Structures are given as structure tokens and as C-alpha cells.
Image: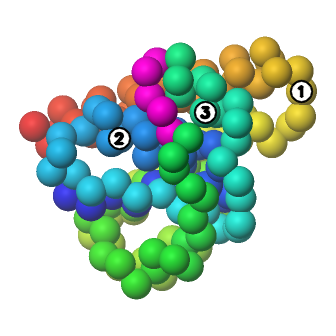
């Protein structure tokens, strides 16, 4: 099964989803993430993922335009603003997991880490449910 995770900048939410999915889902899954706009992988997000033993530092931010010609079994949208843009994709199913962008508002590092952890844990729970559905 081929899954695409989409958010606005492919810098935090969809990057965490990509890293978590590569770890939690069977090897038979092909995982990709992308964003609507050019972004840069968030360094605090990398640190928060390392806390649970997942290194996403090698991942890169990708634009939705880079993958628009590919076919996906599932497109999982992590940001409501990205929903409309996914209508052009070739997919059997679009799923909405609307999550607040934990790094949209600047703040103290520990405050941001806590916000990112909460989003990470919601994504992990959603992926565990998805894995159970496909088992």
C-alpha cells in the first residue's frame, strides 16, 4: 500500500507521520510526505522524534507538485488548508487527520517541544489504528 502524508510546509506534521509510518507500518507500505509550500525540516521536530528512537534528520521537505503524478492508495491530509489541493491527486481514498501546526506560533523551545510531542502522539495513535485495519 502506498501512502502520502500532506500538510502545508512538509516541515513538521507530515515529516513526523512519514517517520512514524516507516517505523510502525509493515515493510509492504510505501510512505511519502509532501507539502503545499516550500518548507524546511524543523529542527525541534527532529529532536522530538529522536526522543522515541526515530531519526528523521535524513528526510527532506518535498512539494506536493513533486508527487502529483504518482498514484497513492491513501492520501492522509494533516492540515485542513491542504485538503483542497489533494483533490488533483490520483488516489483511492483521501483521509483527513486535521492537526494544529505545533510550530506555527513561535515560542520557547520546551513549550514547542511539548506541542510537537502531543501532535506526534496523535499521529502515532492514528497510525496504530491504520495498521490494525490492514492486518
**On the picture, is 76 further left or further right than 39?**
left
Give the image quarter of residue 37: bottom right
Where in the figure is residue 3, as x and y percent of width and height? 33, 57
Q: Residue 77 in the image: x percent, y percent?
A: 50, 55
Q: CA distance from mark 2 to mark 1?
A: 28 Å
> Which image quadrant: the N terminus?
bottom left
The mark that comes first in sequence, 3 or 2, is 2
Of residue 111 and residue 84, the one placed in the foreground of this image is 111
Q: How is the image coloured?
A: rainbow
Q: Earlier in the sequence, mark 2 or mark 1?
A: 2
Residue linked to disc 1: 107
Horizontal arrangement in the rendering, residue 75 relative to residue 35 (left or right)? left
Magenta span of residues: 52-56
Residue wearing tag 2: 21
Main SS of the magenta part reads loop
Disc number at residue 93? none
Circle 3 is placed at which residue position?
A: 46
In reply to whether residue 77 is colored magenta, the answer given is no
Rendering coords of residue 123 (x, y %)? 46, 33
Q: Is residue 39 visible?
A: yes
Count of picture labels: 3
Q: Is residue 97 visible?
A: no
Secondary structure at numbered mark 1: loop
Which residue sits at x=60%, y=58%? 61
Circles 1 and 3: CB distance less than 8 Å?
no
Q: Residues within 10 Å of mark 2 (few under 14, many from 20)?
A: many
Amino acid at each position: 500500500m502506498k501512502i502520502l502524508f500532506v500538510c502545508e510546509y512538509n516541515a513538521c506534521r507530515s515529516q513526523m507521520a512519514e517517520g512514524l509510518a516507516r517505523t510502525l507500518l509493515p515493510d509492504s507500505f510505501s510512505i511519502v510526505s509532501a507539502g503545499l509550500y516550500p518548507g524546511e525540516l524543523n529542527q525541534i521536530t527532529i529532536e522530538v522524534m529522536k526522543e522515541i528512537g526515530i531519526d528523521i534528520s535524513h528526510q527532506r521537505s518535498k512539494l506536493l507538485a513533486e508527487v502529483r503524478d504518482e498514484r497513492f492508495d491513501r492520501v492522509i491530509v494533516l492540515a485542513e488548508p491542504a485538503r483542497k489541493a489533494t483533490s488533483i491527486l490520483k488516489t483511492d481514498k483521501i483521509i483527513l487527520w486535521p492537526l494544529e501546526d505545533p510550530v506555527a506560533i513561535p515560542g520557547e523551545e520546551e513549550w514547542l517541544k511539548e506541542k510537537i510531542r502531543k501532535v506526534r502522539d496523535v499521529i502515532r495513535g492514528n497510525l496504530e489504528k491504520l495498521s490494525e485495519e490492514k492486518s
